[in-house]
Image: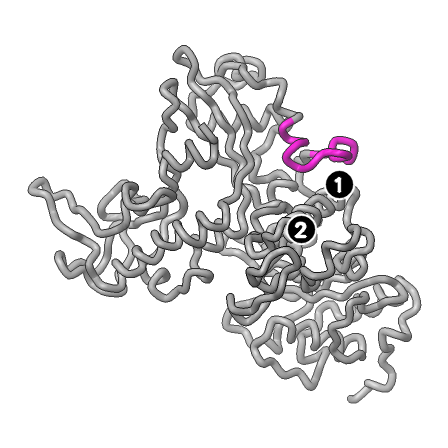
């Protein structure tokens, strides 16, 4: 039955309660039930337009103001998914609005396009299920999201980091990994979608303010489990006047210079496990659980790694990242590759222990994300060479008389940033090859991964 005449348009929704009631009526409905005229052309925004038109009875638009302007509420529709281990996560970042480099830097945060449009978000979550028709996707959850005081302080700092890069004429070097909760994601058909920037002649990729996928995942998990994270790192007072990084450094500063044994005793930890350094650092922050379970670390997409520096100043080892599949790398372009996405979006926190008189002491905490040129010039060369080796079928260059295989993958001496070598410890731990190896005829090969060179870690990350 066509009841479009009875639907309230957004102009007719006068109160927050009316808006919530309308949104609640959409829960449990499939997309084709909400909008009978639903047509998808493959664009991510289709779901939002379907809800706008079918659920709230107003036409698609790209206005700078909030969708429900009288209530100052912006409508967002976004997917979540069920993972193989039974947990839920957001499928993607939540895109907010395009960044106008020529105008945004002129404004305060309170007058910015970001805050003007997105102070309060009505977020409807639909469940993405592979091999299910898009029109059958169902709205499962809805929330009226307002940023907590703690989150808002971090988001304001994130916004300022983005603005400072624009003012420095480096809009073309902006990375999602620069910031914590608020990202500046690429927005356009491809890397050729660029915009003019005010303080440089270099075209900058078109980007949009967005809430990171990991930030959205924390919201999803709180919704699906009806619980909040057990450990929270900051309170409002700790963040006033300090950035995310400054707040953490203040927390751990009293422990700098203490030995491993002193810290183990102080925190009553009796362990020789390799993870003991992370356990020590967790206690320094006043936490008891794993850092990976802490709300702020989840939302900010921070990866914590421990670095041990020897008395000689040498970093103990190179730094590895997850193994890549040979069949994946040959079908990817650089900006779609797993290694690019990792360094483009992830912030790292390195916990540094340095050996002095035979014992490790807590030395420092370093926050880092890969600089633009290191990623898009040097590491890209490593990735490109690796793809060429796999595609050509020339993985094994020669075999030593003891049976050891030597490969054509780029080694440490060929690039200042990274290299490729085995991730597995057993030669039988393999992935399929898209092209069999010419020298050996092998159709599978030992798992490989990208590594950051130990010298790069020492000099470019630690600055020693």
Measure the C-alpha gap from mark 2 to mark 1.
Answer: 26 Å
Quick one: SS at disc 1? helix
Q: In the rendered structure, find residue 462 and report the number of the disc placed on it.
A: none
What span is colored magenta in the figure?
234-249
Our reading of the magenta stretch's main secondary structure is helix
Which residue occupies 57% across, 66% down? 194
- Indicate whether residue 217 is drawn in magenta: no
Q: As rendered, which of 46 and 225 lies closer to the eye?
A: 46
Quick one: SS at disc 2? helix
Q: As rendered, which of 418 and 274 lies closer to the eye?
A: 418
Q: As rendered, which of 395 and 385 lies closer to the eye?
A: 385
Image position of 31 with respect to 175: above or below:
below
Question: Mark 1 — residue?
Answer: 150
Image location (x, y in percent) of residue 404: 15, 43
Which residue occupies 59% across, 47% down? 178
Image position of 315 with respect to 179: above or below:
above
Quadrant in which residue 246 is drawn: top right
- Indicate whether residue 245 is drawn in magenta: yes
């Amino acid at each position: 039955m066509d009841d479009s005449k009875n639907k309230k348009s957004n102009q007719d929704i006068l109160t927050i309660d009316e808006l919530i009631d309308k949104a609640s009526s959409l829960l449990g409905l499939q997309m084709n039930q909400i909008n009978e005229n639903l047509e998808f052309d493959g664009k991510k925004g289709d779901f939002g337009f379907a809800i706008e038109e079918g659920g709230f009875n107003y036409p698609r638009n790209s206005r700078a103001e909030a969708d429900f302007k009288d209530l100052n509420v912006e409508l967002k529709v976004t997917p979540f998914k069920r993972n193989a281990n039974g947990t839920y996560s957001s499928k993607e970042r939540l895109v907010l609005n395009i960044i106008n480099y020529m105008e945004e830097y002129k404004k305060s945060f309170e007058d910015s396009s970001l805050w003007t449009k997105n102070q309060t978000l009505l977020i409807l979550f639909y469940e993405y299920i592979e091999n299910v028709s898009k029109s059958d996707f169902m709205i499962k959850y809805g929330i009226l999201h307002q940023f907590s005081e703690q989150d808002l302080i971090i988001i304001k700092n994130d916004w300022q980091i983005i603005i400072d890069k624009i003012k420095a004429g480096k809009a073309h070097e902006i990375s999602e990994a620069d910031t914590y909760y608020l990202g500046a994601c690429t927005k356009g058909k491809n890397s050729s979608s660029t915009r003019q920037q005010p303080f440089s002649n270099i075209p900058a990729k078109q980007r949009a303010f967005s809430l990171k996928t990991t930030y959205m995942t924390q919201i999803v998990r709180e919704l699906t489990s009806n619980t909040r994270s057990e450990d929270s790192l900051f309170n409002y007072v700790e963040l006033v006047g300090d950035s995310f990084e400054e707040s953490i450094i203040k927390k751990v500063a009293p422990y700098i210079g203490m030995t491993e044994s002193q810290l183990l005793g102080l925190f009553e930890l009796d362990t020789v496990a390799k993870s003991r350094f992370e356990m020590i650092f967790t206690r320094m922050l006043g936490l008891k659980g794993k850092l990976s379970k802490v709300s702020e670390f989840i939302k900010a997409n921070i990866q914590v790694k421990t670095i041990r520096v020897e008395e000689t100043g040498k970093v103990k080892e190179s730094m590895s990242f997850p193994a890549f599949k040979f069949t994946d790398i040959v079908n990817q372009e650089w900006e779609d590759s797993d290694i690019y996405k990792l360094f483009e979006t992830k912030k790292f926190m390195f916990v540094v222990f340095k050996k002095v008189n035979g014992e490790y002491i807590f030395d420092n905490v370093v926050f880092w994300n890969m600089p633009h040129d290191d990623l898009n010039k040097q590491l890209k060369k490593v990735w490109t060479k690796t793809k060429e080796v796999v595609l050509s079928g020339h993985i094994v260059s020669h075999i030593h008389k003891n049976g050891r295989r030597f490969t054509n993958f780029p080694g440490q001496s060929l690039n200042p940033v990274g290299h490729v070598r085995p991730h597995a410890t057993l030669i039988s731990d393999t992935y399929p090859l898209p092209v069999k190896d010419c020298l050996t005829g092998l159709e599978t090969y030992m798992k490989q991964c990208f590594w950051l060179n130990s010298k790069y870690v020492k000099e470019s990350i630690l600055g020693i």
